[in-house]
Every structure is written in structure tokens, then in C-alpha cells.
Image (tube, rainbow, N blue to C red):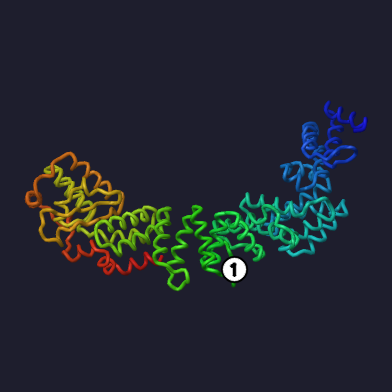
Amino acid sequence: MRRQDIRLLALARQGDLAARCEVGRRYLLGADGFPQHLGTGLEHLRQAARQDAGRAAQVLAECLPLHELLQAGEWPMLERAAADGSAIAQMRLAVVKFGLGGDSAETDLGDAWIWLQRAAAQHAGAERVLDAAWAASRAQRLAVLLAAAAREDRIDAMAVALWVATQAQALGRLVALAAALSAAMALHPADAPWPEGLAQGFVALLRGAHATRQRLPPVPAEALRQALERCATAGDQAAMSLLGRALSGLPADGVPAEVFDGQHNVRKGAAWLLRAADAGDGEAWLHLYRLHADHSLSVANPQMARFFLEKAAQMGLAEAQRKLGALLLRGAAGLAESEQAIAWLHAAAAQGDGHARALLRTLVLPVGGTDAEAAWALSMVQEHDVGLAARLALARAFGLTKLEALSVDPSDGLRPWGLVVGRNPFVVQARLSAPRAVPALDAAAQQVAERASTLFTQIPAGGDLRVRSLRQRRLFERLGLSETLFFADASASVLDTLRLGPKWAHRTRAPLSLALAA
């Protein structure tokens, strides 16, 4: 290093403003006897900015390549230099604002046009960039601007386009993101490897369109396909899921249908969906169920479809829980299958699934009277027989028959989703004594069951069925109460339809069809 350079460094270290700016300039450019070193140049200019922000900003904005300036987080310095009148900074600022401002109406780009016109008034290169911008269509403007700026200034057009894409993604500006990615593809040589981050940007665009249910802005279809395949191959879960759906012909929000026109391959799509599901995508299990349950497709397989539906239900998807519960209940041949089915339907209903709630309602028999009348009657019974009052509340909440209400053991029958009326040991006829699973239609019903369970672990059951029945009848006669307020009226054949899946499915064809089709 020359003697004068050493003296200049010494002055910079002593705090001389001009020396700091000059040393910073030389390090950034690698000029006048100084090696190029971005970090050292930035440090000198940041120290100079504490003394004179405008002077340091101008050196930084004009000497540091735009993409490096943006990556270093010096965007405020670029704005300061542009405001202070630097034509180079104004042109660079305009280019970036065109990229980030393309997310809405044309008038929102007015700021970018103003900066570019100011730069053109004092810089011939900026004037040529302005002319190129005027001549370009809106869809191609960013790519044209970047290419023109690269010819007039030391701008890495591809790096700036990718930076703009990253910022647009962080800000949730899908239109700006699409424009930046399209510009990057236009600037990218066809035979060159894809730069890092380009494929991920396209997948982020698709993911954003899927999440917001927005229509994807115009982007090259081939680029979208390549980006999805690249990211899916690299293990990106979202890319695997989107690619699997698009190849299978399933709706993929955010991916325009024309992107995969003539490219459908159900087997390949199912393979990608399986990889996405294995990576933790619950919806992918549900999509696999749809594919394998469709008898018109080559991948149709009822056993695999059932397996995929179970996996989706276990992941907490309400639709899968509802469909699995409906299928299990339709084929239930006994209490165990009914309990399992009701548990899945209850889980779906807890997430607000209306079809699941409709199916659960078909398992609860209606009772008469109003809730106010029943509450008054219960308060009267409570004064004479606490145990009977608990059974009556249970009967009204779960639509139990008189025989079921007086024989049920709430402590043994309580379930997280409702109540099981066990086999009645006091009744010899099998059709009348068979157990039945009854769901809780709301939280209030479940609380009634829990209170009854707690009560009957503390007090005696109160004799056999005949004793309880006689006590109930006499108390109702004394108080003038109607049994229709608490007990459901159902024949043995009606109760059979609630115990056996095929009979229940025949009785509730319409809501069942809706639940499976929705």
C-alpha cells in the first residue's frame, strides 16, 4: 500500500469525515490501491454517516452495486441519497419501487415514475431507462427496466429481481411477487442453472395464492411446473402437495388449471401426495382418500382409501372425521363399532361441522315439552328424590326411553362424547335389552351426564328396575307431571335402527348422503 494511502487510512481512523468517505468508496470499488472489501467499506461509511448522513449516503448509494446495497439492508441510505439529489440513487430507487409497487393500481406507481423522471433530468443513462419503461407493457415493465438499468449502471438485474421477490413475499404482495419472478425468468438464460431462491419463490407464490384463495397473476406456466418439481424433489412439503394435486387433476387453489393441461398423471400425483402426507400434510391424506375411493380412476383401492381416510381423521381434519364416522356408523354391527363411529362424528361436530351434527341428531330420540317446563318439573322431583331427578335430566338430554332411563348406569356408561345405555339385566327380551350408544348433542348434555355419573358413584342405585319404576310413577302422579317431558317414545324396531348401522343408514339416507358427498 502506498504511503499516501496509509496516511488516508490513518486520517479515517482518527475520525476525519472526508477520509472516511474516501476510504469507504475505495474499499467498495476496489480502486486506487485498495482491495475490494464490502464489509470494511460499509463500516467506514457507517461511521461517516454519524457525522454527515447525506454525504455518506451518496457515496454508498453510488458506489455499492444495487443488489449488494439492498442485501446489506442499506435501503434507507439509498432513499437519503435520492432525496439529496443523486441521479444514480434516484434511478436505482425508482427501479426498486417499480418492483415493490406493482401490487395494485397504476396510480400507486406514481412515486417510482417521479424518481425516474428526476434522475432522467440530470443523467443520460436514466433518461434511456425512462424511455425503455415508457415503451414497455405493464406485464414486461420490470424486466425491461432491470435490463435497461443493467446496461446503464452496475446493476445485477437477476439479483435485484430476486431481492424484490423476497421482499414482496414477506409483505404478502402476490402481484408484485409474480412480476418479480416473471422478470427473473425473462432475464434468466434458458440454458443456465436456476439461481438459488427462484424455484422457492414460485412455490411461495402458489402457496400464497392457495392460502388467500386469490387467482394467480400471469406467470410462465412452464416455470411454475419446473419450480414445483424442483422444490418437491428437494423435499418441500407445500410443493409436493400442490404438485400431487395438480398432476392428479384435483383442485389446487392458486395453481391455474391451464398450467397442467395435458400434464395429468394420477399415479405420479398420488405418489407426490403420499410423500406430502408422510411429511405431515393432513390434507394430502384426504386427497389420497378421494383418489383411491374414486372407482373410475386407475388408482382406485377401497382398502387404501379407508386407510388414508383414517390417517386424515387422526390428523384432526373435520371432513375426514365426519366421513370416517359416517362410514363406520353405516356398517356398524354392534356397540363397539357404534361407539367408534360416534366418537369421530363428535370430534368433527366439535370443529363446527354441520353435517356431523346432523348425523348425531338422528341418533337422539325427541322428547316433548319445553325446557322451561322440564326445568320446573325437575326442581319438584329434586325435592323428593335426587337420584330420580338425575335420571330424568339424563333422559331428556339424551332422548332415552323410560326403560333406558330407569336402568342406565351413568357411572359405567359415561363417554367423552356422550353416553352408553348398557344391556338391561332386568329385561329378558333381547331386542328390548340391547345396549345403545347415544351422543351428547351439546356441552350441556355432556355436563348432565357427568353430573349424573358423579352422583351415582356416591349414592345407591335405589333398588331394582321395578322399585325405581314404581317410585317414579307414584311421584309423577302425586306431582301431576307428564312422562312425555322426559321419556322418548320409541318402539323396538325404531330402537333397532339406532343400534344397527345398516338399518340406521336406510332410515337416514338423505343426511348420510350429504355427509359423505360434502
Is the residue marked by circle 1 packed among few (<14), some (14-19), or many (20+) residues within 10 Å?
some
- Residue 263 makes an appearance in the image: yes
Q: Quadrant of the C terminus?
A: bottom left
Furthest residue toward top: 14
Question: Number of callouts in the render?
Answer: 1
- Closest to the observer, 251 or 281: 281
Residue positioned 27% across, 51% down in the render: 418
In the image: residue 382, left or right of residue 100: left
Q: Which residue in the protein does label 1 denote?
A: 260
- Please provide percent x and percent y for residue 124: 88, 54
Furthest toward the right, the residue is 3
Viewer-closest of 140 and 198: 198
Q: Is residue 390 left or right of residue 162?
A: left
Quarter of the figure with residue 109:
bottom right
Indicate whether 372 appears above or below 225: above
Residue plotted at (64% across, 62% down): 226
User: With respect to residue 50, does 116 lie above or below?
Assistant: below
Pinpoint residue 186: horizontal percent, then vertical percent.
73, 61
Instruction: Point out residue 16 in the picture as x, y percentages from the top left corner.
Output: 85, 29
Residue type, label 1 = Phe
Residue 141 visible in the picture: no
Residue 70 position in % (x across, y down):
73, 46
